[in-house]
Image: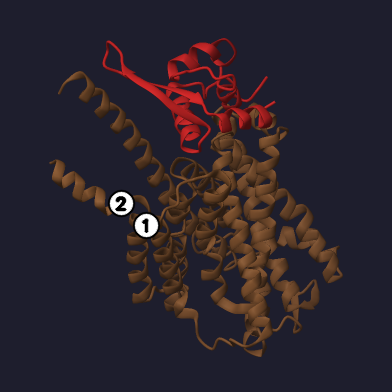
Chain colours: A red, B brown
Amino acid sequence: MLPLNYAILKLFENGDEYDVQGVEAELKGDYSSFRAFKSKAINESLMSAEKNGLLDEVRYELDDKQELHVYYKANEYGADMIKSYIK
Amino acid sequence: MNDSQQLAEARRARTSSFFKKGVLIAIASGILYGVYGSFLTGATFWGEWIPWYGYLEGAQGAGWYDAGTSAIITNTLGTYAMPMSFLMAVLILGALGSGLNDFFSAIWMLIKAAIQGRLADFGRCFKSKPGLVMIVCALIGGPIASTAFLIALIMAGPIATPISALCPAIGAIIGRIIFKQELNFRMACGIVVCVIATFMIGSTAFTGLELTDPMFLAGLAVALISALGWGIEGAVAGFGTSVIDYNISITIRQVTSGVVTLFILVPVLFLFAGNVGLYPTMVIDALTGPLFTDGVLSSPLIILLISGLAAGLSFAFWYKGNSMCGAALGMACNGMFSFWVPFFSFLVLGLYMGGGEAYFLAPIQWAAAIVMVIGIFLIAVNPLDWFKKDKEA
């Protein structure tokens, strides 16, 4: 089993787009029992990955409840980095 | 406000909140570094550290910076008296203090990881490629840079401190070259202002410098090694924290540094000093030396537990801040430790432990703190943006 943060980044290696809720939906089967599996922590993880050039923000929208959803995608550098460093 | 304005505003608020949180975390890392530095020094005020450091300080006038002069390390009961060179004595005492500090820090961080339910992830990360990068960072920033700093202090004197505090500038350059992080002319100017402020803080100790002494010049070169080590650690570990959770990366850092320093580096130094048998005795003495009864902070063990906790949190926030703000801004905010260390030394050592006026801050050090804040603002904020905002308003 991969560490939670690795599993989050691994979702992006094939060019798929996710927001925080998308990441939660993909990983809840294996990681929902983790105390660190929370929206706030996942959000910070995605924003840090963007700040460090691994992910790019591709689009953002407000839902019916006026909550912001930001979608990320790995750039070429990020996808290579994730593939080569996280096995 | 229409839908698109509302959307843009929500996104701006999210980005701004992340940025502010990163800056606050990076500033907190510098403050906690001050607490850690002052308490680690405070441990040497008690127990067996008194005779150990007493011998070094007693001979200060007779050649503190002369690596060849002999010191005798003994305990209060006089059960051992070990002659060694000053260089070796300072290295052993420095490495013993930082090794114990990092070891206790590692225990605190393991407890923290356990409470957060991250202990299993810590084990998994330790064995992975990014975990290996963190271990290498810990070795560069822990035993290597810290030991280089101690040697530089002996060879070049107190000027080693501001030289080693060049690490934010080095970290920013590494962040730019390797990780393509932002470093424009304005940010570079801000880093230069911070470096000037660091030299202002250290300037009170710049007396009687032997500028042509080869030992002094070699000491400056060794101080640069410590700056390079901490610069590499800050930039690489900051980036690594975008892959490994910062609670886990700091646990890897402190476990590696604590174990390697306390259980490998210190015994090897004792071996070179010619008395490896004294190693366990001095480790126990360092923690269980005679206790004084005036106050809770009168035991080296309690003080090292406090410094270890502050060190762990400080490095954790350093990594986290760098990953949120980039190495240039994160390390500049953390670099305010060159003010916070004397500030907390004034509070803890000068006022609480009765160290006296030697720990009081000079006016130039207060002024330097303000200069440093200006430097950090210059890195973080483009002044032209304020004018733009005014126009928009």
**Residue tagged 1:** B186
Give me the chain letter of mark 2.
B
Name the kind of residue labelled 2 in the image.
Asn
Q: Is residue B96 above or below residue A76?
A: below
* Residue position marked by numbered label 2 in the rendering: B382
**Which secondary structure, mark 1?**
helix
Q: Amino acid at mark 1?
A: Arg
Image quadrant assignment for residue A19: top left
**Picture quarter containing residue A68?**
top left
Q: Residue furthest front?
A: A76
Q: Residue at x 64, y 45 (%)?
A: B253
Is residue B12 shown above or below B98? above
Percent position (x, y) of residue B241?
55, 38
Relative to B272, A11 lies left or right: left
Q: Residues within 10 Å of mark 2 (few under 14, many from 20)?
A: few
Residue B262 in percent (x, y) is at 73, 54
Q: Position of residue B137 (x, y in %)?
A: 65, 48
Find residue B307 and report its horizontal and vertical position in percent.
55, 54
**Quadrant of the frame with the N terminus of chain B:** top left
Circles 1, 2 touching at the beta carbon (< 8 Å): yes
State the mark number for residue A4. Answer: none
> Local crowd at mark 1 within 10 Å, few (<14), some, or many (≥20)?
some
Q: Looking at this view, is B211 or B254 the one in front?
A: B211
* Residue B77 shows up from this direction: no
Residue A23 seen by the camera: yes
- In the image shown, does B381 or B363 lie closer to the viewer? B381
Q: CA distance from mark 1 to mark 2?
A: 8 Å
Which residue corresponds to the image point at 38% horizontal and 46% vertical from the top-left?
B24
- Chain bearing tag 1 is B
Compared to residue B75, the image places residue B330 above or below, namely above
Report the quarter where the C terminus of chain B lies.
top left
Please tell me if label 1 and label 2 are on a single chain: yes
